[in-house]
Image (spheres, rainbow, N blue to C red):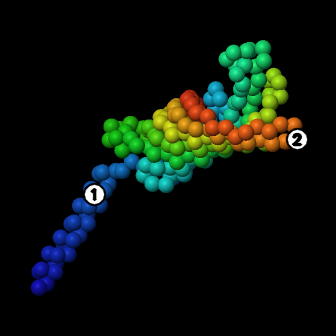
Amino acid sequence: MKKLFFIACISLVSLFSLKAQEQVNSSTASVEKSIFGVQTGFLGVWGNYELGLSNSISLRTEVGLDIYFDEGLLFDQDNLTFGLTPVITLEPRWYYNLQKRLQKNKNITKNSGNFLSLETSYNPNLFTVFTIGEEVEIRDQLTIIPTWGIRRTYWDHFTLEAATGLGLMHIFETKDNRIRLEAENIIALKLYFRLGYTF
């Protein structure tokens, strides 16, 4: 009986050692627990925080300034109007190829990988930082865009990010003493390339 108990104990110790060794050898890719960064691009400047929710899913929050412009940019350069308006964004992201990148010995630092997301952005009519051209009041806008993108990190802190998507923008109704503008729904195209720094 003592021999059987001894053999069972040795077997269990060996089994646990083997399982522990397997876990060390088969590392699992995972998003970072938290990342804070800043980004800039042709269409604005933003600060963001990304919180890891699981091995492949994160929740990104962002505040910043978007560039707005009117049709003068394309059609009538004499009446061109543009400036900066605030934006708040909430974006769940699914990094779907981190494990594959890790197996190929590619960098996954600071969530370097490809992602699918659902970006929800709100542009409130609070203020404009500057305006070139005629003063334009920006109406409150809510944008929801399914997005595909890539993110790469270099030298542990510098990031490149590009994304594209097609979704819906809701422009809220505006009422004041002078004018009333009805709510509108329009198709929104997202296409960006950003340079950033993570802390």
Residue 142 appears in the rendering: yes
Q: Name the amino acid type tagged 1.
A: Gln
Q: Position of residue 76 (x, y in %)?
A: 73, 15
The residue sitting at 49% across, 55% down in the picture is: 53
- Say whether disc 1 or disc 2 marks the residue closer to the N-terminus: 1
- Residue toward you, 166 or 92: 166
**Distance Cα–Cα, label 1 vs label 2:** 73 Å
Residue 108: x percent and y percent? 43, 41
Residue to which mark 1 is pinned: 21
Residue appearing at x 62%, y 29% in the figure: 41
Residue 118, image x, y percentages: 52, 44
Q: How many labels does the image show?
A: 2
| Marking on residue 177 | 2
Vertical arrangement, residue 129 with respect to residue 199, above or below: above
Q: Give me the residue at 34% from left, 41% from top.
A: 100
Instruction: Choose mark 1 or mark 2, whichever is in front.
Output: 2
Name the amino acid type tagged 2: Asn
Q: In this view, does 149 lie to the left or right of 60?
A: left
Residue 71 on image: x %, y %: 70, 22
Name the one closer to the observer, 117 or 162. Answer: 117
Q: Is residue 38 visible?
A: no
> Which quarter of the figure is the N terminus placed in?
bottom left
Q: Residues within 10 Å of mark 2 (few under 14, many from 20)?
A: few
Q: Nearer the viewer, residue 137 or 103?
A: 137
**Residue situated furthest bottom in the rendering:** 1
User: Based on the displayed image, in which of its 4 quarters is residue 18 positioned?
Assistant: bottom left
Front residue of this view, candidates 139 and 184: 184
Image quarter in which the C terminus is found: top right
Query: Disc number at residue 154?
Result: none
Answer with left or right where residue 8 lies relative to residue 101.
Answer: left
